[in-house]
């Protein structure tokens, strides 16, 4: 058997890991079968290298650990996966074995780096999306004709007021504290009434849902709109008369 021993092995994340790691890894490269598997018995390998079996076991454990600094992010950067008592799968063996020259090796590494950047970007966007979905604000319900809009806003009163420019008959039915995630959950709850976008049919079950939450669905929330200093201020900004 044989394997390809690339210069990059000495400049990557194995840099400075000690001679035993490189000795075991060199043995792995040259003895791995074409299907990417190898049998490693620490007692046998220690006799071949000329060291204590515990040193071989330590090196094998290192090669099986995840490595977030590895050029390859397959299997979280692990170089080997243990699949039996002495049976190991060498993660990128087949890919490296098929590389014919240095240029192909560089192209392979560039592709792996692109894949790594793409994965990081996906995780970044997922984190941003997750953070955005938990942003506190208000879920609001506004009716126009026989349709109800279920939306999310930091200021639903001002939001509905903006809608009136194009849709004069729209009225705010109520609001309650929530997040974009909660808005999505309510959309899913009434998906059988969905028309398009954030609009739903004003069916009895939706009306019942709104009415059952009326206690928290009030426009008299001083923390909701920073410009509302009077707890009896209407969404339009005009003070309402107090009941005698």
Image (cartoon, rainbow, N blue to C red):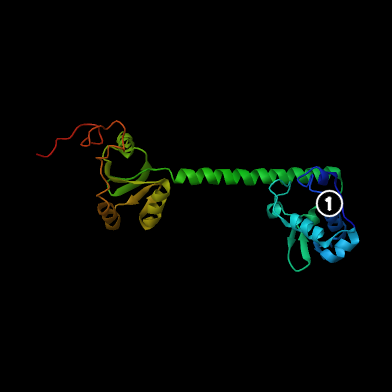
Along the line of sight, the residue nearer the viewer: 204 or 174: 174
Is 25 displayed left or right of 81 in the figure? right
Q: Quadrant of residue 222?
A: top left
Q: Residue at x 76, y 69 (%)?
A: 85
List the residue tagged with mark 1: 22
Nearer to us in this view, 4 or 186: 4
Residue 172: % across, % down: 27, 42
The structure residue drawn at horizontal position 64% and vertical position 44%, both measured from the top left corner, is 118
Q: Is residue 29 above or below residue 178?
A: below
Q: Quadrant of the N terminus?
A: bottom right
| Residue 232 x/y as whole percent | 20, 36
Percent x, y for residue 146?
Answer: 28, 49
Element type at mark 1: helix
Q: Nearer the viewer, residue 70 or 34?
A: 70
Q: Quadrant of residue 209?
A: bottom left
Say which of 18 and 185 sits in front.
18
| Label 1 Cα crowd, 10 Å radius (few <14 / some 14-19 / many 20+) | some
Q: Quadrant of residue 27?
A: bottom right
Q: Is 181 drawn above or below residue 220 in the view shown?
A: below
Is any atom of residue 47 visible in this view? yes
Whole-percent x, y for residue 225 in the image? 31, 35
């Amino acid at each position: 058997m044989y394997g390809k021993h690339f210069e990059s092995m000495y400049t990557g994340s194995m840099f400075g890991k000690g001679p035993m790691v490189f000795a075991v890894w060199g043995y792995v490269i040259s003895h791995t079968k074409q299907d990417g598997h190898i049998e490693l018995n620490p007692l046998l390998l220690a006799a071949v290298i000329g060291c204590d079996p515990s040193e071989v076991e330590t090196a094998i454990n290192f090669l099986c650990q995840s490595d977030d600094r590895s050029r390859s992010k397959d299997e979280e950067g692990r170089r080997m996966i243990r699949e039996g008592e002495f049976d190991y799968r060498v993660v990128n063996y087949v890919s490296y074995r098929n590389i014919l020259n240095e240029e192909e090796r560089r192209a392979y590494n560039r592709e792996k780096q692109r894949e790594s950047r793409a994965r990081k970007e996906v995780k970044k966007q997922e984190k941003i999306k997750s953070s955005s979905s938990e942003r506190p604000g208000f879920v609001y319900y506004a009716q126009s004709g026989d349709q109800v809009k279920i939306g999310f806003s930091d200021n639903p009163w001002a939001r509905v007021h903006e809608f009136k420019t194009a849709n004069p008959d729209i009225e705010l039915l109520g609001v309650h504290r929530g997040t974009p995630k909660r808005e999505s959950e309510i959309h899913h709850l009434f998906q059988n009434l969905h028309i398009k976008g954030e609009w739903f049919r004003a069916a009895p079950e939706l009306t019942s849902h709104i009415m059952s939450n009326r206690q928290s669905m009030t426009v008299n929330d001083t923390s909701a709109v920073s410009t509302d200093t009077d707890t009896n201020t209407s969404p339009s900004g005009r003070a309402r008369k107090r009941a005698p």
